[in-house]
Structure formats: C-alpha cells, structure tokens
Image (spheres, rainbow, N blue to C red):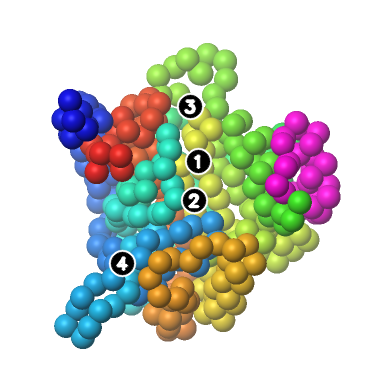
Amino acid sequence: MSEPELTWRPTASLAALRRRAELNARLRAFFHRRGVLEVETPLLSAATVTDPHLASVGVRLELPGGARGLHLQTSPEFHMKRLLAAGSGPIYQLFRAVRDGEAGRRHNPEFTLLEWYRPGFDHHALMDEVDELLADCLGSPPAERVTYADAFGRHVGVDPHRADSDALRHAARAQGIEVAGMATADRDAWLDLLMVSCVEPHLGRSSGADAAAEGAARPTFLYDYPASQAALARVRAGEPPVAERFEVYVEGVELANGFHELRDAVEQRRRFAADLETRRRLGVVRPSIDELLPDEHLLAALEAGLPPCAGVALGVDRLAMLRDRAASIEEVLAFPIERA
C-alpha cells in the first residue's frame, strides 16, 4: 500500500473524539456557570513571544498593502491582555496554538490551550479555581500545594533560591544526572535540568489505596518560583524575592502554567529586551519571518492600565490524555502532525 492509504485514518478512535467533544462542552459549561466570557483572538499577529524556550512559526501573507510577515501565536496571552485592558472583565478561550520544535509523546506542534484571566484574583485564588476545574473534569481530589523551594529541598536537597551554578552542578552529579554539554549552562538551566529529572516525576502522584482508584491522582501545585523565572509574572519582594507564578502537575505531567500577572509596562519592556539578549547569547534560532521585536500593542495596553489579575494556560490535549488514561497524545488527536 502507498503511504496515504496507510495513514489517511485518524489516530484517535471515534469514541475518543466523542469524549474530547464532551470535554470541550464541560469546559465551556464550567466557565458559563461562573460568568466568564468566551473570546476569540488572532492566530496570526505581527508580534510574537520572546521567551527563549518557545519558538513561533513565521508566515508571509500577500495583503492589499503588500506582503507582510506574521507569526502563528504560541499562546493567546498578549491579545487577551489587550482585551482585559479594554475592560472585558473575566475571559477565557479554547485556542489552537502553534509552537515549533515541539513533537513527541505529549507534544504536537499544533495543540489546544485553555487560557483564562481573572481580574481581582492573585495566583492563590486562581489555583483554587484550577483545582475546581480539575475536580470537575478528572474527578481528582483537592490538590496539594508545594513551594518550589520545598520541592527542591525534598527531592534534590538544595535551596533553589540560593544555590549557585556550582552547587546545582554538584547536586545533579549526586543524582546521577549526565551533565555533558552543560559547561556554559547558567543557573536557570541547571534548575530546569534538576526540575525535569528529579522533581517533576514525583508531582501529582497519589499513594496507597488512592493510587489504584479511578481518577484519584492528586494534583500538585508548585508555586513561588525563583525571581529569575518570572516570565510574565509579578515578582514579590523579600529575601529571597519570588515570582508569583505556579504550575500544576497530575501524574508527573505538567498541565498548566499560571501567573499573578505583571502590569508594569516599563518592567515588561525590560524583560522583553532581556529575553532577546538571552536568545542572542544562546544562539536560539529566531522565527523565520522578519525580526523578532517586543509586542508594542501589549506594552501600550499595559501603559493604558491592565487591571490586577491572574491568568493561566492549560493544555487541553494533556487534560484529555489524563482523562482517557492515554499513553500518547496521538490517542486524543484526530490527525497529529505526522498525518496532518
């Protein structure tokens, strides 16, 4: 048989696709009950993410004014914040995002994000709501909450806020982690390596009788990250200062990333510039269309006034995988990239 004759069928079963539709309906009902407005924002935009760990895809369109380079968005965050600054109130959307270089058992370059923003919430209040959503969709028990520092102390034996690169290198070797190729790694790269290798596998795990119960995995919220990993979150002053952000894990799978949102346009511009400098230092490949620049529309919205708020992005494909107990993302997608 030819390749198309072998690969034209969807990888997800029809039963899985029906369950996926039911999950989408459940998510919409969850927000409808809470009075959160569903919105739609562009997939194509002139600006894109500057985060060195994310890669957007560039395209060129022929428009009435001439050819224009645009980017497929890795997240709807920038546009949703513009809506918040315009007075939208609480909003959410199910967004088809695209990220280059992400493919594997839990990744597909094109995927679905559930992203929502809550004016008046901090990251703790938003964790409460994420916990309620997971209970509604997965039947999970109330989550545990662990600070980033406590998790590293428990599973690595170091203080991630104070340990320098040498201490983190020694901790990695003590854990039996291969450190070849890390000679020029900075402190955050060591923290990321230890997080993935030593901390994440233990998060969102149930124990005892609960471990065998259907849908009983207990989520874990990891919060108060090092200030150097603030991304788009506020930094709370103190000793040490911490980024007011969280991630949630279920069965060792990172499911969502949330922030008590930064509202300072000057600080946001500084972080954009720092991201671009990090990209240059690391030799990170830029998007293929035009130069990567800060999103001036977002900065103008912050200057106009973003309300105090918290926001979170949750991977819907991974949520579906957990709900179906699927081993691969292909089991919950009709056509992953290999069959697109």
Q: Residues within 10 Å of mark 1 (few under 14, many from 20)?
A: many
Q: What is the three-letter code of the residue carrying label 1? A: Glu
- Secondary element at image label 3: loop
Quote the CA–CA distance across marks 4 and 1: 29 Å
Q: Residues within 10 Å of mark 2 (few under 14, many from 20)?
A: some
Q: Which residue is mark 4?
A: 59
Earlier-in-chain disc, 4 versus 1:
4
Q: Which residue is mark 2?
A: 257
Q: Which residue is mark 3?
A: 217
The front one of 4 and 304 is 4
Residue 265: tell me if it is visible: yes
Earlier-in-chain disc, 3 versus 4:
4
Q: What is the three-letter code of the residue carrying label 4? A: Val
Quarter of the image where one finds residue 71: bottom left
- Secondary element at image label 2: strand
12 relative to 159 in the view: left or right: left
Quote the CA–CA distance across marks 1 and 2: 8 Å
The front one of 104 and 251 is 104
Q: In the image, is residue 334 above or below residue 327?
A: below
Asked if the residues shown at circle 3 and circle 4 are in contact, with their CB atoms under 8 angstroms apart, the answer is: no
Q: Quadrant of the N terminus?
A: top left
Earlier-in-chain disc, 4 versus 2:
4
Q: Which residues are magenta?
A: 158-182
Q: Residue at x 39, y 38 (%)?
A: 318
In the image, residue 156 lies at what x, y percent?
A: 75, 37
In the image, residue 61 lies at what x, y percent?
A: 24, 72
Q: In the image, is residue 131 above or below residue 185?
A: above
Q: Residues within 10 Å of mark 4 (few under 14, many from 20)?
A: some
As for residue 181 lying within the magenta part, the answer is yes
Quote the CA–CA distance across marks 4 and 2: 27 Å
Asked if the residues shown at circle 3 and circle 1 are in contact, with their CB atoms under 8 angstroms apart, the answer is: no
Q: Which residue is mark 1?
A: 254
